[in-house]
Every structure is written in structure tokens, then in C-alpha cells.
Amino acid sequence: MLDTVTIENLTLKSAQTRAGARARPPILFIPGYCATAWVYESYLPFFAERGYPGFALNLRGREAQGIVSPGAEATALADEMSKKLLTMTDPDDGTPIIRNVYKRDDIYSGPFLQNAAELQVGMNDGYRVSWQTTLGGSPPGIVYKNDRKWSADHGGYDYAITPGVLVSSRPITTHDPRIIDLAPTVLKYFGLSIPSDIDGKPLF
């Protein structure tokens, strides 16, 4: 059962824990990684049954049952979330977990801007979202040790400190290639026209 709650003038969709459940920290679901906020309508009751009260930013006009107003209300919530995310530290040694929180209007542009998530979280080196979290689970605590190999998956790393390797049989025209340059490069290679609104530039 989902309720609509207002916290400090912000309207959220909420699932509260049952009476007598063990008290656990609340969870705020942020749309954008795999889908928008509507998917959390099934996640919220799941976590609430296990003692985690949950809240999801459901933007009115974007989600079918959106309740957070675009504009000042959504901006205020995104600002508050950004500040709080940047305060997260490793409980063992105080290392910052989140390196940066990127706001949509600062990193995206184009006609579909309003469909993008308000925030993109970039984690520091050594931290990532858990496999359990992306599958709808909830591991104990905020941080736990991972002994498995990190390879070929989506971990939420900060792009600014994530190195990459470009292998090309042709000389490229820039010393700073970007991943967004690959699409126009492929189009040019095959002799296809490059749309004027595409991000990036051909590398050769």
C-alpha cells in the first residue's frame, strides 16, 4: 500500500513499515539508472515489509502517476539530495563515497532533456552500487566488502576518474577523445550523414 507524504514541502510516494517491524534507515529511490520512478511502486512495499521505509521522486508530467511538481519543487529536492549524497562516508575510515553528483541540466542537452534523471551519482574509486541493489535487494549497512572481481558491469563510477582505452587503425584528430565521439565517427566511416544535433565529433 503506497501513500503520498509531504516532507519539508516536498511531496513523495511512500511505503511505511508495518507496526512492530525492526526500525531501519529510510531509502530514497532516485529515478534514472535503469528506469524512471514508476518502477519503484513495486520496490517500495518490498523494502517496507523488511523494515525499510522508502520514498521515490515521482515527477508530475513525466511519470504516469507523478506527484513532484517540475520547477522549483523538483529543483529543491534535487539540490537537497545532492548535498546529502556528498556527505556519505565510509564508516570504517571516513573516506568520501560519492565524488560528485551531476545535475541533469549541467550535463545533458537536447529535445529529450526532460526525460533524463535529475541527478547522476559518480562514486569514488573503490566504491560502486551493489549487485544486490540493482536486482532489488538490500545488503546490510551502507558499505560492505566485496571480494568478487569487478568486470564489465555498471557500477556507478564517476566518469571523470574512469580511464578508457581507444584502439584505432587510423590516426585520430584529437588528443582528448570522448565516448560520445564514437557514434559520429562510425557514421562518417560508413559514409552516412551525421545529424546536426548529435553529440560528439568524428575522430578522423
Image (cartoon, rainbow, N blue to C red):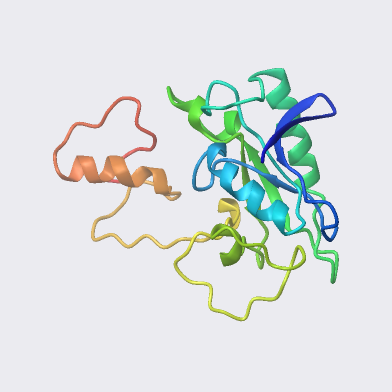
* Left or right: 43, with 108 as reference point: right
In the rendered image, the residue lying farthest to the front is 19
Q: Is 68 situated above or below 99?
A: above
The structure residue drawn at horizontal position 72% and vertical position 59%, both measured from the top left corner, is: 50
Residue 122 on image: x %, y %:
63, 51
Name which quarter of the figure residue 88 lies in.
Answer: bottom right
* Left or right: 185, with 18 as reference point: left
Q: Nearer the viewer, residue 100 or 1?
A: 1
Residue 54 on image: x %, y %:
72, 46
In the rendered image, the residue lying farthest to the bottom is 147
* Left or right: 68, with 20 as reference point: left
The structure residue drawn at horizontal position 77% and vertical position 57%, both measured from the top left corner, is: 51
Residue 147 on image: x %, y %:
62, 81
Q: Nearer the viewer, residue 10 or 188?
A: 10
Image quadrant holding the N terminus, namely top right
Residue 57 on image: x %, y %:
66, 35
Name which quarter of the figure residue 155 lies in.
Answer: bottom right
Q: Nearer the viewer, residue 160 or 79?
A: 79
Q: Is 93 situated above or below 174?
A: below
Give the total of numbered labels. Answer: 0
